[in-house]
Amino acid sequence: MSTAGYLGNQLLVAMPALADPNFAHTVTLICEHSERGALGIVINQPLEMKVTEVLAQLALTTDRAELNEMHVLRGGPVQVDRGFVLHEPGPRDWDSTLPVSRTLHVTTSRDVLAAIARGDGPQRALVALGYAGWDADQLEDEVRQNAWLTVPCDDALLFDLPYEQRWQAAARLVGVDLSRISPVAGRA
């Protein structure tokens, strides 16, 4: 879905100098990016809330014990009451789904959560509340100011790696060791 010059299906890794409390030490998957702006989901800030709590709020029941252990992510500071499900393509199409890549979709409709609760939804998924949003040219300006390191998305990082390891691991995908970067940015 990414076109030349746009960052769809890229990970934004917050540089050590990024002090905004909403984004310090975060990894954000860019789900959509165009001349109008960008939308992303932070993938490494788990909330205390579990997926079963979200399901209960939607009057969905489940007997899948693993959902009791699955954290909901703080997807970003915008519309924190709105849910997003990042998932592999499932056995069927879901309402309100945006393909981020061939192997990754984001869905905002209840039907994918109902399928996950039943056990016939996507095999791997992340549930997030809220999103990160950028107006036209805002994200490009932040990248030029060295606030973000851009990294090609790695589905294994999203679904298989513990949350607390994702920031360093995402940077390592392009050979960057964040512990060796000064938190003070400068220009030559």
Image (tube, helix red, strand yellow):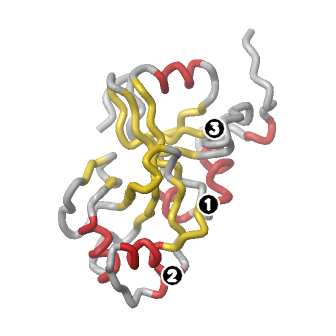
Q: Secondary structure at mark 1?
A: helix
**Residue 55 place in picture, x, y as percent:** 38, 75
> Viewed as shown, does residue 30 lie left or right of 118?
right
Query: Which numbered marker is on residue 163?
Result: 1
- Look at discs 1 and 2 and give the one toward the viewer: 2
Q: Which residue is mark 3?
A: 14
Residue 51 position within the rendered picture, expressed as x and y whole percent measured from the top left: 46, 73
Local crowd size for mark 3, using a 10 Å CA cut-off: few (<14), some (14–19), many (≥20): many
Amino acid tagged 2 = Asn
**Mark 1 or mark 3, which has the lower sequence index?**
3
Residue 7 at x, y = what percent? Answer: 42, 32
Nearest the camera: 173 or 168? 168
* Residue occupying the far bottom of the picture: 63
**Residue at left offset 59%, top offset 44%:** 173
Query: Where does label 2 land, which residue?
Result: 68
User: Which residue: 62% across, 46% down?
Assistant: 26
